[in-house]
Amino acid sequence: MLSGLRHFVSDVGHWLTERRWRVLVVLVAGMAVAAAGLGGYLLATDDDGSEEAEGPGPQVLVQEVPQPEATEALGFPAFATANTTRVAGTDPIANAAGVALAVYPSAGGVAGPAAVALVDAADWPAGIAAASLAADPIGAPLLVTEGGEVPELTADALRALAPSGSPETNERQAFSIGAAARSDGLETLEVEGANAAEVAAGIARLRARLVGGEPQHVVLASSDEPAFAMPAASWAARSGDPVLFVQRNSVPGATLQALRDYEGVPVYVLGPESAISPDAMRQIKQVAPEALRVGADEPVANAIAFARLADGAFGWNINDPGHGLVFANADRPLDAAAAAPLSASGTWGPLLVTDDATAVPGPLRGYLLDLKPGYEDDPTRAVYNHAWLIGDTGAFEVAFQAQVDELIALAPIRSGTGSTELAPPPGTTEPEPRADSGGQDSGADR
């Protein structure tokens, strides 16, 4: 019998050698039963090797699983590189679910969020405004519904997150924003409005009611130019500051009323004159005379300027290495809202946008080089950057991700070369000191 067993083992080894592209999966339970059965078999065997009885034999379950035939099937580098991680959803529904579960793993005894914010897939302004609900102490990640229904991906995420409510959410488990569908079984508070400005103002009132008191700042964004409004989502999640909406040439009544309610609160207008015109700016200043315009003339530079901005307690002030960053495609504005919880947890990064899915645009390349960390002797004592990319390869090709990885990676510094190629002197869009804050502002439209 032992001779036969040796032959069996030899045959298995030969089988594995000949079929290196397959793996042998043996279930643990089957192995345990096999070991017990083999012992019983040996005990029931005569000294001369003959069997006394033929009992039921153990069943070892064997499953042949094909190994990936190409490295692309492993998911790398499209899923992650040393310095980047991708949430590879094909649409905001999937991206929002992925981000929510990344921020709130909700496994191993780890609690999920107290509540979630539900927005409709066709309503990107509601998503950007709802990002303020992701900030502490509410901490509600965004999930996306569609056409009055809760998609399966969103429903799966809700089951995994299992929001429980808290005093900070008024014991509600969900906030249904604008046209978003409600999820059965969740205690839900609705925020309604006839347009983007009314919904955003309603979200601002809701957060103020839940956390108490006025916001520290207000961000005004364009409801006509989504690519310029996208960076507001990450800051809202980081700070809890409300995002209110204006149109290119006018300011809706709901926004004007909110600004009156927040009299004296610093107001920042995000985007260039092409997105929010001088006429709209004049209307804003009638109720918020100290409002400041921040940003730049095209979406990529606009997001960089906002990431660099420092004005007292307002602004990311990301001008040196050692930070988190979040990337979204300028053509997919709701991805900015889906990604917002990443800016309120983990590495707390600003949102950067690209208008090119194939390669990092020049202004963004220069900014990332400004942030590139280095070390002289010991890389384990250095600071590091990390980037999240939101969307599948339709949003960012693998080549784009590889370029980001290289641009933000830690690199050795060799002193005495006089070279600035590794990290050129950082550019600045930091504003001049403001008399009432002692900080800085953009130096633009006052």
Image: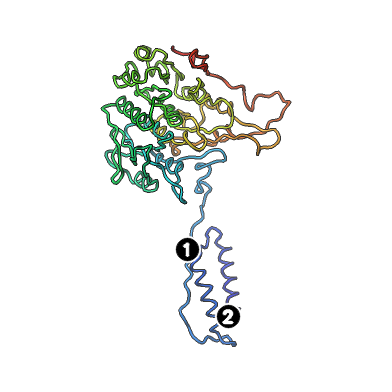
Image location (x, y in percent) of residue 226: 38, 26
Residue on which disc 2 sits: 1
Which three-letter amino acid code belongs to the residue tagged 2? Answer: Met
Density class for disc 2 (Cα within 10 Å; few <14, some 14-19, many ≥20) is few
Q: Is residue 366 above or below residue 65?
A: above
Q: Quadrant of the N terminus?
A: bottom right
Residue on which disc 1 sits: 63
Density class for disc 1 (Cα within 10 Å; few <14, some 14-19, many ≥20) is few
Q: Quadrant of the C terminus?
A: top left
Which three-letter amino acid code belongs to the residue tagged 1? Answer: Gln
Callout 1: SS: strand
For marks 2 and 1, give the CA distance. Answer: 26 Å
Can residue 56 be seen in this snapshot? yes
At horizontal 32% and vertical 16% (from top left) the residue drawn is 250
Q: Is residue 39 left or right of residue 89?
A: right
Q: Which residue is nearer to you in this view: 11 or 327?
A: 327
> Number of callouts in the render?
2
Q: Quadrant of residue 128?
A: top left
Image location (x, y in percent) of residue 305: 49, 22
Q: Quadrant of residue 337?
A: top left
Give residue 363's mark: none
Q: Is residue 407 left or right of residue 271?
A: right
Can residue 279 be seen in this snapshot? no
At horizontal 53% and vertical 79% (from top left) the residue drawn is 40
**Sequence-first tag of 2 and 1:** 2
Q: Is residue 78 above or below residue 13?
A: above
Q: Give the color scheme: rainbow, by chain, secondary structure or one colour.
A: rainbow
Image location (x, y in percent) of residue 440: 51, 17
Image location (x, y in percent) of residue 15: 56, 66
